[in-house]
Amino acid sequence: ILTLLFSELFQIATASCRPHKHIMFLKTHKTGSSTVLNMLYRFGDERGLWFALPTSDHFGYPNYFSAHHVRGYQSDSQQHFDILANHMRFQKSEVEKVMPPDTFYFSIMGDPVTMAKSAFSYFKTISPAFSQAESFHAFVSKPWKYYNPYVQYSHFSRNMMWFDFGFDHNANYSESLAMKGESVIRKTFNMILLLEYFDESLVLLRHALCWPMEAIITFSMNMQQSGSNEEMLLTENQERRLRDWNALDWHLYKAFNHTFWEEVERFGVARMEQELVILRNLRAKQMQTCLLEDGKLVESNKISDADLKPFQTGVKKILGYQLKPDLDNATHKACLNMVRPEIPYRKLLEAKQSLSAPPSLEKNSKM
Ligand SMILES: *[C@@H]1O[C@H](CO)[C@@H](O)[C@H](O)[C@H]1NC(C)=O
Ligand SMILES: *[C@@H]1O[C@H](CO)[C@@H](O)[C@H](O)[C@H]1NC(C)=O
Ligand SMILES: *[C@@H]1O[C@H](CO)[C@@H](O)[C@H](O)[C@H]1NC(C)=O
């Protein structure tokens, strides 16, 4: 049954639509976005698509995105880019200077409680409110005590999604403001994925983009070591405090969660279940093929291969993968692309793109 279904799915995807190749992904923080980025890097890399890459490590973050942050951008030329996906603070008018009009815009959101837990350790050294709090619980019980709205990186401890979408994270919550932000996002973004329903998100995305199943097989990237989780356990009351503290983000999450499940209904609940089974089977098989000990994650400092070493920041160990040593060349290359962390992959794409000029808009306006 599975193989039959599998071939049917490929047929549906290839017969009735053409793969989308102009893509803008707003890479939000602590939402699983590094895994999405790896998927986009692989998709574009394998097909020779042109990436809008930053001139430095990011697009001037936490300042607003500007087209001039894009490597090779020239305001007066007909060049165009296919994929724009690195961290930025979104600014539509500038993004539109870089991306073609038929670009598919998407992003990913998470529950502010989940995100705060991850952000607290990851941004502990750079976000002042986190570094000054004695513990996560101390922060949650009195965020105002540690929070200074005027310092850089304050947004990592308050409404960080709202900030990444380009809005003021210090604005006081009102329903009308929250709904206004929501509607601005809806006008631009074709789809919002959810961290907590990552695989369901990939299935919906694959159909929206008309991508083959193998393009959405991903391994989790940029994972933090969980260690003792007791300090991160919150009571219902504490969770409510955290959602109130991040009220603008909480509004966005609820609103786009609602839309997400409507889309799943429209897609078909049974059909979704079938695709999830296929996706998870393929991922498990791919892990067995590529990785030592079925994908056991190891600490960054224990990985010697620079191509596989994730960027270490924050107070917890960032984890990476170890490839099996005896893979044939083609398998090795495919596996390496799946586990190559963000920075080495970006550098590889930079080097590849430095060898030629970006495609021009006329020549390549077929999508
Ligand atoms: C939000 O409300 C607080 C307290 O009511 C006030 O001090 C602060 O100035 C307000 N912030 C903004 C951005 O309006
Ligand atoms: C998300 O949507 C589902 C399905 O409608 C619902 O059960 C769940 O409570 C929602 N979660 C939030 C945080 O709104
Ligand atoms: C595999 O890659 C190695 C090193 O790049 C190369 O020397 C070798 O010829 C390749 N083997 C095949 C079968 O392509």
Image: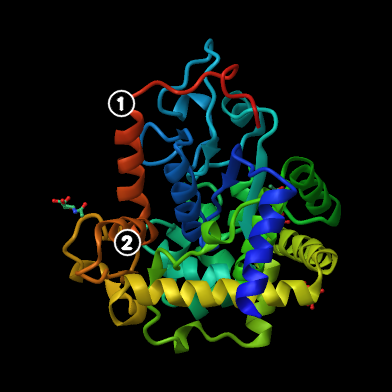
Query: How far across and how far down the image is residue 165, in percent?
Result: 64, 46
- Residue 344 is labelled as none
From the viewer's perspective, tell me whether residue 318 is left or right of residue 167. Answer: left
Q: Nearer the viewer, residue 38 or 274?
A: 274
From the viewer's perspective, tell me whether residue 55 is left or right of residue 174. Answer: left
In the rendered image, which quarter contains the N terminus?
A: bottom right
User: Which residue is at 67% across, 63% downward?
Assistant: 9
What is the secondary structure assignment of the residue under circle 1? loop
Is residue 279 visible in the rendered image? The answer is yes
Q: Amino acid at mark 1?
A: Leu
- Residue 355 is labelled as 1
Relative height, residue 229 to residue 102 (above, below): below
Q: Nearer the viewer, residue 293 or 65?
A: 293
Q: CB atoms at circles 1 and 2 under 8 Å apart? A: no
User: Which residue is at 70% across, 68% downward?
Assistant: 244
Residue at mark 1 to residue at mark 2: CA–CA distance: 25 Å
Total marks drawn?
2
Q: Amino acid at mark 2?
A: Thr
From the viewer's perspective, tell me whether residue 71 is left or right of residue 19. Answer: left
User: Which residue is at 71% across, 50% downward?
Assistant: 15
User: Which residue is at 60% across, 31% downward?
Assistant: 95
Question: Of discs 1 and 2, which sits in the foreground?
Answer: 2
Relative height, residue 307 to residue 245 (above, below): above
Query: How far across and how far down the image is residue 91, in percent?
Result: 62, 35
Q: Earlier in the sequence, mark 1 or mark 2?
A: 2
What is the secondary structure assignment of the residue under circle 2? helix
In the rendered image, which quarter contains the C terminus?
A: top right
**Mark 1 Cα within 10 Å, few/some/many (few <14, many 20+)?**
few
* Residue at the disc numbered 2: 331
Query: How far across and how far down the image is residue 258, in percent?
Result: 81, 66
Query: How far across and how far down the image is residue 3, in percent?
Result: 60, 74
From the viewer's perspective, tell me whether residue 289 is left or right of residue 303. Answer: right
